[in-house]
Image (cartoon, coloured by chain):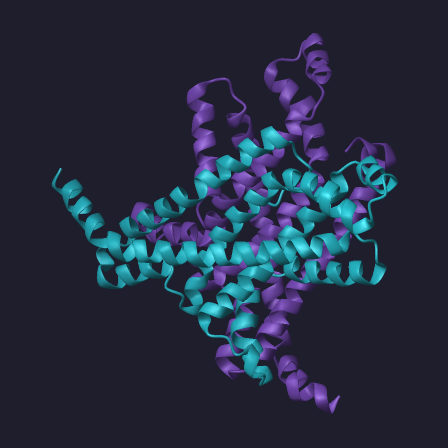
Amino acid sequence: MEFLSNYFNFRIVGQYTDVFIEGVLTTLVLAGICLVLSIFFGIFVALMRMSSNPFVWRTAAAYIQIIRSTPLLIQIYLIYYGLPFLIGNFFGEEATAIIALTIHSTPYMAEIIRAGIASIDRGQSEGAMSVGMNKMQNMFYIVLPQALANVVPPMLGQTAVLIKDTSLFSIIAVFELMGAGLRMYSETVIATESYVTTAVCYLLIYMMMLVFSNIVQKQLGGGAWQTAH
Amino acid sequence: MDSIIEKYQLFIDLLPLLMTGLWMTFKVSMFAIIIGSLLGFFLGILRTLNNKIITNIIGLYLHIFRGTPYLVQLYLIYFVLPSFDVEFLKFDSFTAAIVSLSLYTSSYVTEIVTAAINAVPKGQSEGARSVGMSKIQSLYHIVVPQALKLSIPPMSGVYVIIIKSTALLSVIGISELTRQGENAILRLPGNLMFIYFVIALMYFIYCYPVLRFSAWAEKRYGSIGVDPE
């Protein structure tokens, strides 16, 4: 124990428990809001991407490609400095960060949802059409519910990425888990305890995600569903 | 019209500075991609040898690197490792950047190589064994060449992630593209948005061909169900 405490001072970490708990909760809340928003917009971008109108699908494709080939950091900077230019200093830092991360993760969600929609058998749509549903009803009552259920595993993977991406918020001074580590470092100037604790907190969140996704994979649809995918 | 000429002039003035940044980004990402791929390739093959201890150790390694944000890993390697008082671990910022980025790359590559090797039909290695090849020979002559082909599409997806991650190196003072852009902004604060747009465009020019190549390769060589993004 003597040896260990030379390298890692638990007492100082203990003093910062509240900060880290707050950081974990803020990270989860911010990531949760971004997740819900990006799934919501992702459905629309996926539908736009699958549209037969060339203007619509090319717009969606351009959006997806541009976001996927530029770093999140640059996107955050552009939104953070650009939004006040466009609509004035209306949002706080948290809202700006949420907007930036939502814009960033929507294309990834859209691609996942598009794969899910493509995986639904054509007979489903044809059946829906033949009982008199229109295109909209077919999409929202028949195809999308099945598609979303199919893409839960990759979506959970994307959620894990989303949670990790919130660490960049610390650069634009939004307090979250990484921010908690940086605050501890700036107050105590001991790098090891501050950053190792941050990493351990992220790993705990990641493990929770792993356990959760295992449960989901076991529960969702049972064995037949798993063999089909 | 005047403003366009003015912006063009500004762009020409900034180009040398930003190009040095882009070159640095290219250099760091190439180092990381080459070292990380070799390490990941090695670990990926080790993981398929079905030794329980080795598999578990590599699994732990993967969880640690996949479960924490790259920003945290960067801080750990740049700020925490020097506090262990080992001369070898006191990296300068360039070494720290390459070490952390290579380890991060290897965590993705390991997973891909494992999946690719498992995706090669079992009959291939059984056939190789039955004509008298040793385990190593069958890996080297039969399985790995086929696995490499399968791993091309997801691998290029990983390289895009790595290139985008180099933007974070600006926080430890590597003078790569983002950092050089920030330097330019310090000199010309009025053109902040324009400069960030130019940086985003440069990242786009670097990443987009790789992304397109990944999509093309997936059509050509097929998917093995590992989507790094």
> How many numbered discs sit on the rendered protein?
0
For the point 63% across and 22% down, the residue is A139
In the picture, residue A151 is in which quadrant? top right
The image shows residue B52 at horizontal and vertical percentages of 85, 59
Spot the residue most to the front.
Answer: B132
The image shows residue B144 at horizontal and vertical percentages of 70, 44
Quadrant position of the N terminus of chain B in the picture: top left
From the viewer's side, name the closer residue of A208 and B210: B210
For the point 48% across and 63% down, the residue is A170
From the viewer's side, name the closer residue of A17 and A67: A67
Spot the residue most to the bottom.
Answer: A2
For the point 71% across and 85% down, the residue is A4
The image shows residue B91 at horizontal and vertical percentages of 50, 75
The answer to whether residue B145 is above or below residue A129 is below
For the point 31% across and 45% down, the residue is A86
Chain that is coloured cyan in the picture: B
Quadrant position of the C terminus of chain B in the picture: top right
Residue A91 visible in the displayed image: no
In the picture, residue B180 is in which quadrant? bottom left
From the viewer's side, name the closer residue of A219 and A68: A68
